[in-house]
Image (cartoon, helix red, strand yellow):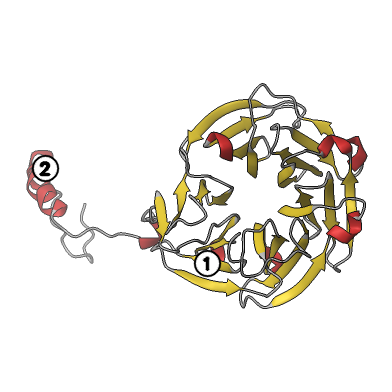
Amino acid sequence: MQHPFLPQLPAAPSLPRLLRLLVVLLPLLALLPGCSNDDDDPVEIPATPDKITVPLAASHPEGIQWDAANQRFIVSSRREGRIITVKDDSTYTALADDARLISTIGLHLDAGRNRVLAAVADNNFNPARTSPATQRKLAAVAVFNATTGNLLAYTDLGSKAAAYSQHFANDIAVDAQGNAYITDSFAPVIYKLDLQGNATVLLDNAQLSSTTFGLNGIVYHPDGYLLVAKTSDGSLFKVPLSNPAGFTRVTTTQNLAGADGLLLSDNQTLLVVAGSQGTVYRLGSTDGWATAAATGSFVTGAVSPTTITRRSNDAYVLYPYQPTAPRFAIVKTRF
């Protein structure tokens, strides 16, 4: 019953009439512009390049690191010594140089401390800077500000292993505390360099020696040990930092002869660049690197690949080609 003081309301439409209205209105509603929340739209991530060819002649690069903060690669040079940066468009810029950089070999970008560490050696790659006093006798580390390229420190390492007449500082790993570990390819030695610039010998053992080219790539594992490759026979060693003398050889059936640069892509996966084989091997371990098995490979061909770096979820390997080549390349691996 209608209340006497309230206005008369229209009667509710019957069900058939309501259905007829919906039939008319629904198509019209579909034509109205929709509401969209930009925050819910998927973020488009730019594709990373498959290959970057750098038109820099006779650089003969050796080490490479991806600098995520500045979206660039950092590259060393056996032939020139200077360190450069490379963008995806193949442009390159000088980052750091010093007269003592005869050949720069392995690199490590310590992004949290804004520094670049470079292993320095002399195997007569750089005619302009080599000398009898340093040929096959030089093992050093140069540390630069990653932003400005200013030299922060230069430390001689070879004098800490004076029992050996020949030295070649090769690759570098850095632990969570900022301690650096450097391999020597001409002496069976791994050096340690702390943040204060104090250099010591972490490990000296005849098992690490070679009559040709010995220790090479090195990485730090978050569980407190180093993984180190030996080029001449492809040995892979596990070196616990709490007891370096208790190092062991990682058991694997994969032939890693010619092993050069290493990349720990996650705690159970290691990428090994076997330069003389023209191949990057992917190894996996489920027992803390007591053993390892091959889980994939990427064939580079005869381009003299040296080392590898992580870029987000990708890994890029360095193609130096020959020492006099008019270019070099940085190539995305695909397993």
Amino acid residing under circle 1: Thr
Q: Earlier in the sequence, mark 2 or mark 1?
A: 2
Identify the residue at horizontal 61%, vertical 65% (top origin).
127
Q: Which residue is mark 2?
A: 14
Identify the residue at horizontal 59%, vertical 54% (top origin).
62
Residue 45 placement, left or right of 196: left
Identify the residue at horizontal 28%, vertical 60% (top origin).
35
The local secondary structure at tag 2 comes to loop
Residue 247 in percent (x, y) is at: 86, 36
Residue 57 in percent (x, y) is at: 45, 63
Amino acid residing under circle 2: Ser
Query: Mark 2 to mark 1: distance in Å?
Result: 76 Å
The local secondary structure at tag 1 comes to strand
Up-down: is 274 above or below 70?
above
Q: Which residue is mark 1?
A: 85
Q: Nearer the viewer, residue 2 or 235?
A: 235
Residue 38 in percent (x, y) is at: 36, 62
Up-down: is 199 above or below 300?
below
Q: Nearer the viewer, mark 2 or mark 1?
A: 1
